[in-house]
Amino acid sequence: MIIHPWDAAEEREALAFVRNNEFGHLIAAGRDRDVPVVVPTQFLLADDRTVLLHLARPNPIWRAIEENPAVMLSIAGGWAYAPGSWRGPARGGDPAYGIPTTYYAAVQLVGDAQIIKDDVGKAEILRAQIGRHEPDGGLVDPREHARHLPGIQGLRIAIRQVRGKFKYDGHLDVSARNYLADRLAERAGPGDAAACIHLRSARTEAGRVPSP
């Protein structure tokens, strides 16, 4: 994806977004394929350099990962459509000549994947994922589901590149962004609240994108 200087997210900001949006598309190019294999999946950002997840054993992505362990995890969210009739006045122009855009946050994690096939390793991944979403417990340990473990495989991704883009008119001045944020607040549609936060956040230096 193209990332302009005013859209670029610092790594810590991109990872913070990922932690709050642990669902994305796992992409494996494999070798000599017409198109990559793309799988929507829940995942866990275990630390700044490790992603954990599991998928059903029949999933076609396993063969692509065996061919080539380099994978990408693509996460996007917080999107909101900004009509041209808003962006024209925000820049001091005629509403009829405004250029519409879509605000969004997107992060791409590139890394090397390791397939986890043993029951102990798979249970460890399940334990970590369940613990993330059900910290109060109450469920039996994943090892108790021994007869189901052969139906899945785990994946550990060692992250080597983080690319983040927060596209929220970062090249406009504060007054223009506040005007657009006001319009989003009035509309109050899906994604508008998240876009408002980004638009209203003050920058401390040119081109820097605020934390989500």
Image: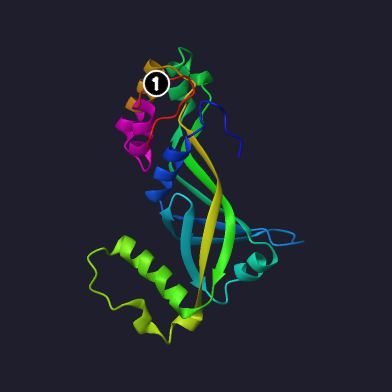
**Residue, far right:** 32
- Magenta segment: does it hold 11? no
The percent position of residue 108, horizontal first and vertical second, equals 54, 46
Colour pattern: rainbow
Q: Please determine whether, in this image, residue 38 is positioned above or below residue 126.
A: above
Q: Please determine whether, in this image, residue 95 is positioned above or below residue 157.
A: above
Predominant SS along the magenta part:
helix
* Residue at the image position 34 percent from the left and 26 percent from the top: 200
The percent position of residue 66, horizontal first and vertical second, equals 66, 68
- Magenta segment: does it hold 190? yes
**Segment colored magenta:** 183-200
Q: Nearer the viewer, residue 48 or 169?
A: 48
The percent position of residue 194, horizontal first and vertical second, equals 36, 38
* Residue at the image position 31 percent from the left and 31 percent from the top: 185
Location of the C terminus by quadrant is top left
Amino acid under disc 1 = Thr
The percent position of residue 97, horizontal first and vertical second, equals 53, 19
Q: Which residue is mark 1?
A: 204
Q: Nearer the viewer, residue 6 or 96?
A: 6
* Residue at the image position 44 percent from the left and 20 percent from the top: 205
Location of the N terminus by quadrant is top right
**Residue, far bottom:** 147
